[in-house]
Image (cartoon, rainbow, N blue to C red):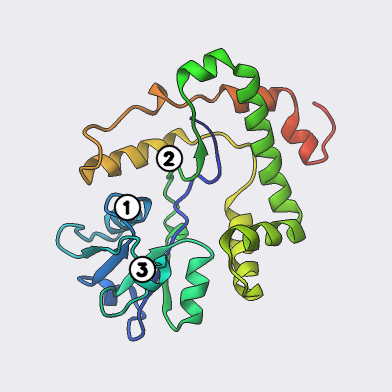
Amino acid sequence: MSSCGSSRIWRRECARPGLSRREDLRGKRWGVVARGDADECAIAVAFERWGWDVRKDVEIVAVGTAAPKLDLLLDPAAVDVAIMHAPDPFVAQKRGWNLVEDLRRLDVAYQNSCAATTRRFARSRPDLVLKYVRAYCQGVHRLRTDATFGVQVIQQYSGETDRWIVEQAYAWFVILMGGPMFPSLEGVRTAGRVLCQLGVIPRNPDPEEFVDLEPVARLEREGLFRTLMGLPAA
């Protein structure tokens, strides 16, 4: 694994009309797309911080993929609370759901988006791996610094046509992404621990077993990030 997009939990909780406080959410039906996904992991981490029991204080509802995701997550007949990331929370807000908790405020290290390949490929094609990681970092930098481009990208790939929703999502991503794109060992460790607790994986792996910091470290030594930020060579 190499190169990360964000190393903090970056989801929000949206609750159906009538639920507006954190305490209102205890014991309710919390919607996720699938069991053991990143949204359920976010629920587990949040409950740890709040002193709630994920086995007793929540009913996890896996809504599946039989219909558009948001139609399933925002069905008040089945779900009381939905865990989602941009642009979905802003769509939910437009539909009358309440943004109750911003889980970014937990400030918990958690590896989100990343690039991954096999050890065999990384050893046989280090040049291609480095080119990919360089392009990844350059793309993130442009997204953050070119608002017109960033908004267009989010609109294109999300399919969202509401300009307000797209702009809110862009502001969200800009806050979360940036800096040298090192994978977060602490974030990977948190993700592994939670997935193990949920029974998704059989053991909590050591991040050093499979996280490779070298491609990003090499780009840093070459001065890529200083160049992107318009700073003179060290």
Instruction: State which tag comes first along the sequence, 1 or 2.
Output: 1
Residues under labels 1 and 3: Cα distance? 15 Å
**Tag count:** 3
The amino acid at mark 2 is Gly
Q: Check disc 2 and report its element: helix, strand or loop.
A: helix
Left or right position of 232 against 178? right
Marks 2 and 3, how far apart in space? 23 Å
Any mark on residue 45, and which?
1
Find the residue positioned furthest to the bottom. Answer: 18
* Observer-nearest of 104 and 155: 155
Residue under label 3, please give it. Answer: 82
Q: At 74% from the left edge and 59% from the top edge, which residue is drawn?
A: 147
Q: Residues within 10 Å of mark 3 (few under 14, many from 20)?
A: many
Mark 1 crowdedness (10 Å alpha carbons): few <14, some 14-19, many ≥20: many
Which quadrant of the figure has residue 55? bottom left
User: Quick one: label 1 or label 3, which is nearer the N terminus?
Assistant: 1
What residue would you read off at disc 2?
Answer: 187
The mark that comes first in sequence, 2 or 3, is 3
